[in-house]
Amino acid sequence: MSMLADRLKQEIAAQGPMPLDVFWREAMTAADGGYYAGGAPIGAGGDFTTAPEVSQVFGELAGLWLVDVWVNAGRPPEFTLMELGPGRGQLMADALRAAAVEPEFLESARLVLVEASAPMREMQAERLAQYGPEWRDDWESALAAEQDAPLFLVANEFLDALPIKQFLKTDGLWRERLVGLDAMGAFKFMLGDIVQPPNPGSAVDLDAAPEGAVLEHGEERNLLASSVARRLSEYDGAALFFDYGYAKPQTGATLQALAAGRPSDPLSAPGSADITSHVSFGPFLSAAEIAGARGWGPVEQGVLLLGLGAEQRAAQLVKNAEPAAAEQLMAGLRRLLHPQEMGRQFKAAALLPAVYPPPTGFDY
Ligand code: SAH
């Protein structure tokens, strides 16, 4: 058994079952064996592949989107360009290469990367050295530190990694799901006291939910939305989030764990698998609006990328490519856009100060 699993078991034995979000946070970020302390899970041979790894067009279009909102904000001469969870640095490398169409954008940007994983930071340092990035461990300290300049932010598959709580309806009442231990000392789901779960929005009727319904609550995700929104309202800027998720609040468990590309048990071996859940964009965008910004979307990733010119960009690349590379480019594009691949399940949402019209791609 890993040191981390051992420590969590001791904590549960001493203090009782822990909320799912607390267990999840430990499993991912603990220094003594958390998932991010280990190797590099993304890309070929890793636990999962992400859109920027599938096609350079993804990062390029994200970069051009950021340049576009920066131009619309009046080209602020100094700003923070922040990425949350940059992974192998591919998105930002492609974004900044594309952003070179506006040299002033590159000159004005101070690049801040929010990354919990040391091995990931090393890869980012390699790919992005020429832009002189700075790193922060977590989004709270990053937003607290970069206070006095406009913020242009991008994040792909970051929100899904932030821990959530789950509530389960049994005997007509809601209880929080906790992680405890079974008689053999293995981790297992248990139930806490009867509680009233946080209101997920009017699309879900908590009283009418059937026996066994699960409600997921992404408090940290919503807090992130309101912190970014406050910052944008005060200092200007824009934020673009991509993630798999759903627009309308709903019940249903979406918690999942992946190890070496295969579904695995989220509880059995903390630190060995990537734990994520789908993002509920409704509460995320509401949190931003309550904090004074305007939330746009979510739109399907395929629809947004098409709107931003994915096909034209791919056609340009194909023109100059060898046949094998051209085929690979088109396959990558298809994977990003096609509704049955990443095009529909993944969504994009944008946050901007309330005074701005809809940004490019969200003006439908
Ligand atoms: N955006 C990248 C990687 C997505 S995976 C891509 O699209 O390829 C999630 C990334 O977020 C990883 O780099 C992971 O190490 C980082 N991460 C996850 N949770 C984090 C947290 N709470 N704080 C900081 N970084 C985190």
Image (cartoon, helix red, strand yellow):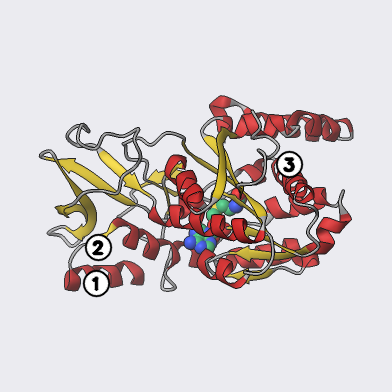
Name the one closer to the observer, 124 or 155.
155
Q: Is residue 116 left or right of residue 333?
A: left
The N terminus - image quarter? bottom left
Amino acid on which the number 2 mark rests in the picture: Met
Residue displayed at 46% across by 45% down: 286
For the residues bearing labels 1 and 2, Cβ distance under 8 angstroms: yes
What residue is disc 3 on? 61
What residue is disc 2 on? 18
Indicate the position of residue 293 as horizontal and vertical percent values. 56, 50
Q: Is residue 228 left or right of residue 130?
A: left
The C terminus - image quarter? top right
Between disc 3 and disc 1, the foreground one is 3
Q: Is residue 209 left or right of residue 277?
A: left
Between discs 3 and 2, the one toward the N terminus: 2
In this view, 343 is above or below 57: above
Secondary structure under tag 2 reads strand
Please tell me in which quadrant of the rendered image residue 93 appears: bottom right
Answer few, some or many: residues within 10 Å of disc 2's Cα (few below 14, many 20 plus, some between 14 and 19).
some
Name the one closer to the observer, 189 or 264.
189
Q: Which mark is residue 11?
A: 1
Count of numbered circles in the view: 3
Amino acid on which the number 1 mark rests in the picture: Glu
Answer few, some or many: residues within 10 Å of disc 3's Cα (few below 14, many 20 plus, some between 14 and 19).
many
Indicate the position of residue 176 as horizontal and vertical percent values. 22, 52
